Amino acid sequence: MIGSHDPKTRLQAHKLHKNRAIQHGAMDFTTPPTDLDKVRLYRRDRICEQLIKHDYAAILLFDPLNTRYACDATNMQIWCTHYETRCVLLMADGKTILFDYADHPHLVDGLPTIDDYLVMDVFYYFAAGAKSGDHAKGFARQIYGMLQKHGGKNKRLAIDRLSHQGIDALRDLGLQIFDGQEVTEIARSIKSSEELELMRATIEIAEMGMDAMKQALVPGITENALWAKLHECNIANGGEWIETRLLASGPRTNPWFYECSMRQIEVGDMVCFDTDMIGPYGYCADISRAWVCGDNPTDTQRDLYKMSFDQLQHDIGILKPGMSFREVSDKCWPIPAEFQKNRYSCMIHGVGLSDEWPSIPYSQDYSEWGYEGIVTPGMVLCVESYIGREGGGEGVKLEDMVLITDTGTLTLSSYPFEKCLLS
């Protein structure tokens, strides 16, 4: 299948049928909760606004999350993260060309965001071997030809990510290359009302999966088997994948970032997880909760949980539209000294199709990792908490998703917290 296409005969724009708005992929054969074409056109236009702002002729997108955001055409999303086998060229005027893995135009039929459909001249080594250099030049000529046709004399091209072979071949043709991640991250940061409906659909499935996990949490179940309940619910309900395997129990909850294993969960263990779930329509549900296996939490577990809960509520409570990222950081919950070393990697981050800009660090990390920005209505932010003593026993991980509104915040995730750990 790899390399089966012949560029000489198959690099022709496919005439697409745009007389119907349809779903694609996992949610096909269902009724969407909102107008998908409005979502598609809004997202495309958000990128175009940034291209115009920076005076870029176009942006070349390889990251499957960015290609989806730009045109909503999907094809083997995870597989395509491994290889430069599929990309989207989005012109500043909205003209969109999909260079696909092979000649499968049925995968984009009905999408209003695709103007031309071509087969990409791939050059990664798996497909092209020793001919990679020649194919990289062929790919560059494809892109250059489209820029000449649709971009006028502007040779400023933004790219989200591309190997040196592709970059070198494009520069050899006289193109000026710029980092496209600023374009896509800023574009993706403000959600439309229709996007929020799709995000709510993912959150609903995530919380159904969390219910299934909680019902399955009995002594003797492995961490992997418990985590599989979330996967099963996600896939069965039109979700797509889960970005991480962040579920840990007992002593593996501290420090954080152990991923789930064949460890059997024991009575009295703290169990913490972070969903990182890409659900229906490609949106992410990023929610963390902590439970105790059994009915008798210890005083230490209660203390850890209460601190994590207090941190979460405090940091949600300070968020308001118009605040600078620095102001948010300065007002964050003061983490006690004994928990400082194991604090989470950031205080707050954006979320949409995945974790997204911005990332707001804790005040003690701001001089090294902080950057300028304003909390803006339409952002969806994940507020993080992890409480675990350095060299201590268990830890607690909590996280909620929050929409920034015109007047304050609205918490989108609604899974209940543990009354037995807050009493």
Image (cartoon, helix red, strand yellow):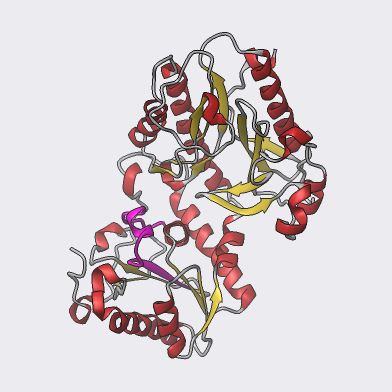
Name the image quarter holding residue 383.
top right
Closer-to-camera residue (96/332): 332
Q: Residue furthest top?
A: 296
Where, by quadrant of the figure, is residue 32 drawn?
A: top left
Q: Residue at the location (61% across, 35% down)?
A: 399
Left/right placement of residue 393 relative to residue 60 reads right
Expressed as whole percent of the image width and height from the top left, the position of residue 163 reads 42, 72
- Whether 228 is among the magenta residues is no
What segment is highlighted magenta in the picture? Answer: 72-90
Q: From the top left corner, tell me how far across and down residue 157 is, in percent.
A: 51, 79
| Residue 324 visible somewhere in the drawing | no
Q: Is residue 73 found inside the magenta-colored segment of the image?
A: yes
Q: Residue furthest front?
A: 391
* Depth order, front residue of 47/124: 124
Q: Which quarter shows the N terminus?
A: bottom left
Q: Does the rendering let one see residue 398? A: yes
